[in-house]
Image: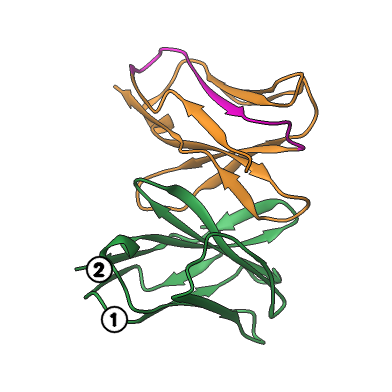
Chain colours: A green, B orange
Amino acid sequence: DSGVTQTPKHLITATGQRVTLRCSPRSGDLSVYWYQQSLDQGLQFLIHYYNGEERAKGNILERFSAQQFPDLHSELNLSSLELGDSALYFCASSVGRELFFGEGSRLTVL
Amino acid sequence: TQLLEQSPQFLSIQEGENLTVYCNSSSVFSSLQWYRQEPGEGPVLLVTVVTGGEVKKLKRLTFQFGDARKDSSLHITAAQPGDTGLYLCALGSGNTGKLIFGQGTTLQVKP
């Protein structure tokens, strides 16, 4: 158990819809990272938040957005979903360079 | 853009065999991490290597960082079925968790 909690574990939705994925980092960790894992692209960095502020952006689509709340939990919002957005979405928190990943949210877009 | 290439992509071996997987970068990196991911779970950090030529051991796993800091290898001795999983190498960016991952090596160890 990494201490990072993600919900939901599985989500099935239709194209054009919007979903929100939630992440609670390990107790005391101020950083939250979001990663997307798909079969063809592998594990890709999306975005990093530190203590409520966006710190870095990776290959995150404009249809996706994230935020980190005062209690340090984070949400990743995915809108206008397309078939290609089907993937595992991981949240991780860290101390320095070591990442602790949650179990992921598996999104299926039909 | 710095890229990481891992080889082989897939490896299926019998219990007790030895194996080596490789991670190569297009340029010099400051640090490299190895993660292992089991089905249905997130990646778990195995080791971080930072110094050229560095060797780290974790039970039956030996990690090596190339002298030129452009490549790394993971050697597993006497593989066990419990070693089955996806092995990922990742480049760090500064002292943060923003990582660039390789595509991974899927290892299957058959009893």
Q: Are marks 2 and 1 in contact (CB under 8 Å)?
A: yes
Residue B73 placed where, x, y %?
59, 22
Q: Secondary structure at mark 2?
A: strand
Residue A93 x %, y %: 62, 63
Position of A54 with respect to A14 (left or right) is: right
Task: Residue A94: name its quadrant.
Answer: bottom right
Q: Earlier in the sequence, mark 2 or mark 1?
A: 1
Res. A74 visible in picture: no
Which subunit holds the residue at mark 1? Answer: A
Which residue range is magenta in the image? B13-30
Is A79 located above or below residue B94 in the figure? below
Which residue is drawn at the image coordinates 63% and 40% (left, top)?
A: B2
Task: Name the residue type under label 2.
Answer: Val
Circle number at residue A17: 1
Q: Is residue B32 left or right of residue A76?
A: right
Look at 54% across and 47% down and name the residue there: B44
